[in-house]
Amino acid sequence: MDYTALGQPWQSAKVSNERLPRKTNSFFTYAHYPENWDLKEMTFKKGKGEVKKWVWLPYLHRIPFTAGVNGTVMNGKHLDPSVSKARLIEDGYTIIDSSKYNYIRVYKGIGGKVYEEKFLKIKRLTRRKIDEKFDHDEYDKFRLQLMLDGTIEPPHPIILEDKIQDIKKIRGRLGNRIHIPEIQNKIDTLTFQINAMTEALKEVEDKGLKHYAA
């Protein structure tokens, strides 16, 4: 059985009677902190063809909301995470509105509701076993859309340069062992990563938000 089809948007009051064999968990939100970015190779349509390039995508934290923790309370029968969200914003996070972007799915689980990301595909193998696969391509497209919508601002070049310097330091510490094939392979991989990061950084500096288009 494909449980993914049973997952309801979190705003919906309807939850399938089919029980997911997982324990109940906490409602959550995606949030982004300005220092945290992933470098991904994305494919864009251009004219009649396609082009690939390296793009800085926001790393999204999954922040759980549990009653009694970090300002989250119960308001009657409803969870109220407003104080927790306010604290995150005060700390510099950007909250990704789950009502607007519809990225949460809710299932009936063991002991209550199970909240999951819509990118997690869940399939039942046996009565007690399930297979979970995360759709990274759709997740990356979602993160790209956050940038195109202006929900998250492009990364500051200083932050990206710091990331590049961190990788260069790692490579530098390996430099005296290049006679070992495994180490040389690692250095080659890091060099490729540094070049890709530098290329993407330059495009952010030159194009800003247009970095996220073909």
Image (cartoon, helix red, strand yellow):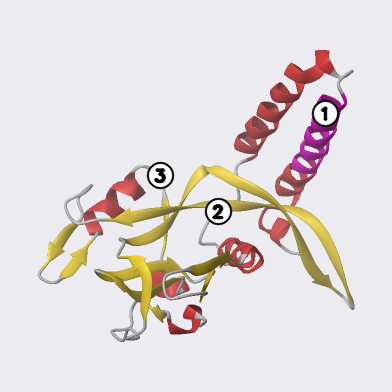
Mark number, residue 153: 2
The kind of residue tagged 3 is Gly
Location of residue 92 (image quadrant):
top left
Kindly state the secondary structure of the residue where label 3 is placed.
loop
Looking at the image, tell me whether mark 2 or mark 3 is earlier in sequence order.
3
Location of residue 214 (image quadrant):
bottom right
The kind of residue tagged 2 is Glu
Residue 117 position in % (x across, y down)? 46, 67
The kind of residue tagged 1 is Glu
Q: Which residues are magenta?
A: 181-198
Residue 22 position in % (x across, y down)? 36, 66
Looking at the image, tell me whether mark 3 or mark 1 is earlier in sequence order.
3
Q: Residues within 10 Å of mark 2 (few under 14, many from 20)?
A: some
Q: Is residue 145 above or below residue 107?
A: above
To which residue does mark 1 refer?
A: 182
Q: Separation of disc 2 and disc 1 at Cα?
A: 39 Å
